[in-house]
Image (spheres, rainbow, N blue to C red):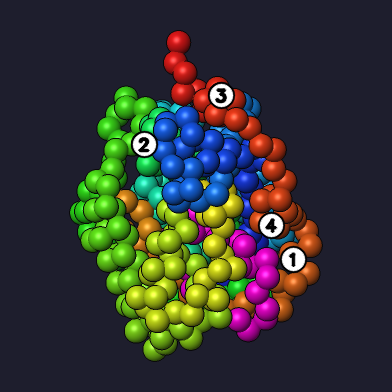
Amino acid sequence: MKTIKDIGIYGYGAYVPMYRIKNSDIARVWGNDPERVPVKEKSVPGPDEDACTIACEASKNALLRADISPQKLGTVWVGTESKPYAVKPTATIVAEYLGATPSINAADWEFACKAGTEALQGAIAYVGSGMAEYALAVGVDTAQGQPSDALEYTAAAGGAAFIMGPSEGSLAEYEGSYSFVTDTPDFWRRQHEHYPKHASRFTGVPAYFSHITNATKTLCNELQREPNDYDYVIFHQPNAKFPMAAAKMLGVDKEKVIPGLISPYIGNTYAGSAMLGLSAVLDVAKPDDLVLCVSYGSGAGSDAFSFKITDKIIEARERAPNVKSYIARRVGIDYAMYARYREKIRM
């Protein structure tokens, strides 16, 4: 899929809460082997943080890098599966915080872990069709995992925001995108349930790997490229192993995946996962580098995007904190504090 107008990423920003819990602590509490954990530690939102506050911080950073007035935004779209209100949009709060109201389109998007890139596809179409000069898309989550469940080791918090705008002056030119979707029930949460359920190993094959590889191959065929032609490749990161396994299936050198691999340090940020990985790559990529980003959302689907970095990115990076600085800004907590912050003790 390509747009009528030439567009690109005009601004990007990220945010990760500073609290961390080591997975060895979670394993110890539930009597599991602390050496067999999927990631080293994960980020935990503080008692005054939620998907909305994280979206606000990431969006502010994106706006700083874009260096435009918030009144120029045509959309504020927030993709999440952990919004603080069941009935009330998160996007309106973010738009008001940024100073983008009232002449704006605001909405929340849902599609499990690819809710953020689904909003990004919409922002690309909105700008690419000429309906707006700039559009903001956010992917953010404060994911929950049931105590003692496998998800508890990876369900983390964080988010990233992207402003799409005209190609001229952009930080990365948009080359094309593709979405691959099927009805594959590998992960779900019914209304009024506190924690999601999953189909265990079914979440890998045929869920994650089928959608990631099909989306990647189709986009590359449309652009007449091979996956390994890219300088950087980002896949959704439910853990550290899945992205590397997908890269091997697609013939991508592992060195091209590692710069965007942040799950070993902060866990799976769900709707923020692929977008945070893309932000981490934009923090280090050079002009003319090619970047491939492929998300995955349970239910199930993948969005694949192709970008080419411009020389504008070098100056823009300095206007906001990078992903590495958020990862380094950590405060360790134990399981008791984690249970309190995540409201796992219900009274």
6 horizontally vs 313: left or right: left
Q: Secondary structure at mark 4?
A: helix
Q: Kindly identify the amino acid type of the residue bearing the numbered disc 1.
A: Ala
| Residue highlighted by disc 4 | 324
User: Do the CB atoms of the residues marked 1 and 4 lie less than 8 Å apart?
Assistant: no
Q: Is residue 29 above or below residue 114?
A: above
The answer to if 286 sits in the magenta stretch is yes
Quadrant in which the C terminus is drawn: top left
CA gap, disc 3 and disc 4:
27 Å
Camera-nearest residue between 101 and 209: 209
Place of residue 197 in the rendered image (x, y in percent of width and height, measured from the top left): 29, 38
Q: CA distance from mark 1 to mark 2?
A: 41 Å
* Earlier sequence position, callout 3 versus callout 4: 4
Q: Which residue is mark 3?
A: 336
Closer to the N terminus: mark 1 or mark 4? 1
Residue at 48%, 86% in the rendered image: 229
| Camera-side mark, 1 or 2 | 2
Q: Which residue is mark 2?
A: 149
Give the magenta part as a residue range. 269-295
